[in-house]
Amino acid sequence: MKFPAEPFKIKVVERIKTTTRKTREKLLKEAGFNIFDIPAEAIYVDLLTDSGTAAMSDNQWAGLMIGDESYAGSKNYYRLEKTVREVTGYEFVIPTHQGRVAENLLFSTVCKSGMIVPNNTHFDTTRANVKANGAKAMDLPIAQALDPALDYPFKGNMDVKALDKLLERDRSKVPMVTCTVTNNSAGGQPVSMQNIREISDVCKRWKVPFFLDCARFAENCYFIRERESGYDKKSVKEIALEMFSYADGCWMSAKKDALVNIGGFLAMNDGELASLLKQKLILIEGFPTYGGLAGRDLEAVARGLIEGLDEDYLHYRTAQVKYLGESLDRGGVPVVKPIGGHAVFIDALTFAPHIPQSQFPGQALIVNMYREAGIRGVEIGSLMFAEKDPDTGEAHYPDLELVRLAIPRRVYTTMHMHYVAESILKIFHEREKMRGFELIYEAPVLRHFTCRLKEL
Ligand code: P61
């Protein structure tokens, strides 16, 4: 079945409220048209992120009840360690309370000023942690990743030739090669096993460690099974084990594919590195058998990791995202192709060509989605990324102006996706009415979180 029904029954429900258009207009004005400032209770379908927003299963909730809250040696830690070893094959397992702490521990340990960390595309917290430690975060996506309309099966891949050239020129400056699966910043697109194998070969040749940012590894491995020759008869679990075998370690924000509301970890084979990371962990997160989490949270991550690899779930999960993407595509809405694993990305420059990038067309769509239908997405374009030239003050705009609709896991039904598609199609048909925005307040860093805007 192309679009399977949900492979679960609903045991507990959370009421979501509908609001009137008048209320939404008022809230938008009060928030300075910044969607981060709208109370979540006033949102009908919240597609801001797929991170930490999953619905846990009855099995995970049951796991919370056997949380062992011992300061040291909690039984839930040992269960997590065993599960991570089974899934990744790595020996040393270090829990953290979320992904960016794992990044902080790792990059503050391996990076020095002037170093370079390559990645297919750094996610923003990864980039920030590399930069905060004096190193340069270098993105090496394949050229196909930059064309939103191009349908290519593994648009998340890294340009391995460029990696090889970089190492030939600057091997001594590269402490580690990293790869993000799936490639979130490039549209939630998967990385092929062949690409991971090639990255691994280059890393071995230059004797440089290779780590995976594996927040969405299960979705990535499901796509490998669906799209890469030679994998259709393997289980997603086997594919994952093979993928991890080509790297030396990984870090994970468990808030994605491990289906929890909080949690993360690092895992690796290098005992010396693990020991350095644990020393830092004690300083900032806690004892190495809890890493900033309660014992019950460790149990939920362990159980979620296994559930996240369930193939019925992964089939439904990727199909639900595809259902939304294809519904929009059929109606003529320009979406990034192929549809990614955790989100649908709309190309706002093509959606509203009458709004110049200086007037934030992505944000205009975000505001209209909320005003028309109570839906929240996130702008990934000029509001988030435009940079001013420090000398001339001239603005440089990003190549892509996207709106991301990230789908929380097991939370919304496919009828919610239908509602989202219909609402966006209505805006699309009346798109010439959309107006641009002007900034009236911006903070010096990460302005999209706190800025205020005026509708033109
Ligand atoms: C997201 F607007 N992602 O996509 P943490 N690696 C990868 C991620 O996708 C990721 C992290 C590491 C988020 C949450 C988010 O400005 C933002 O557990 C591939 O969130 O620390 C997170 O994991 C970091 C959204 C984060 C944002 C920062 O929605």
Image (tube, rainbow, N blue to C red):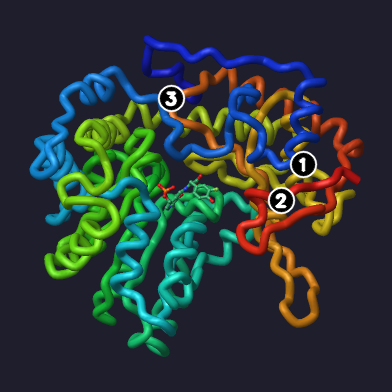
- The x, y position of residue 172, in whole percent, is 33, 87
Q: Quadrant of the N terminus?
A: top left
- The x, y position of residue 268, in whole percent, is 20, 60
Q: Is residue 193 visible?
A: no
Under circle 3, the secondary element is loop
Taking the spot 23% from the left edge, 25% from the top edge, the residue there is: 64
Under circle 1, the secondary element is loop
User: Could you tell me if the residues under marks 1 and 2 are in contact, i.e. CB atoms within 8 Å?
Assistant: yes
- Alpha carbon distance from label 1 to label 3: 32 Å
Under circle 2, the secondary element is loop
Task: Name the quadrant containing residue 296.
Answer: top left
Q: Amino acid at mark 2?
A: Cys
Q: Is residue 86 left or right of residue 237?
A: left
Q: Amino acid at mark 3?
A: Arg
Taking the spot 24% from the left edge, 75% from the top edge, the residue there is: 204
Residue nearest the viewer, comparing 442 with 9: 442
Q: Is residue 58 visible?
A: yes
- The x, y position of residue 15, in whole percent, is 53, 13
Mark 3 or mark 2: which comes first in sequence? Answer: 3
Q: Residue 444, which numbered label?
A: none
- Alpha carbon distance from label 3 to label 2: 32 Å
Residue that carries the numbered disc 1 in the rendered image:
32
Q: Amino acid at mark 1?
A: Gly
Residue that carries the numbered disc 3 in the rendered image:
410
- The x, y position of residue 339, in whole percent, is 56, 41
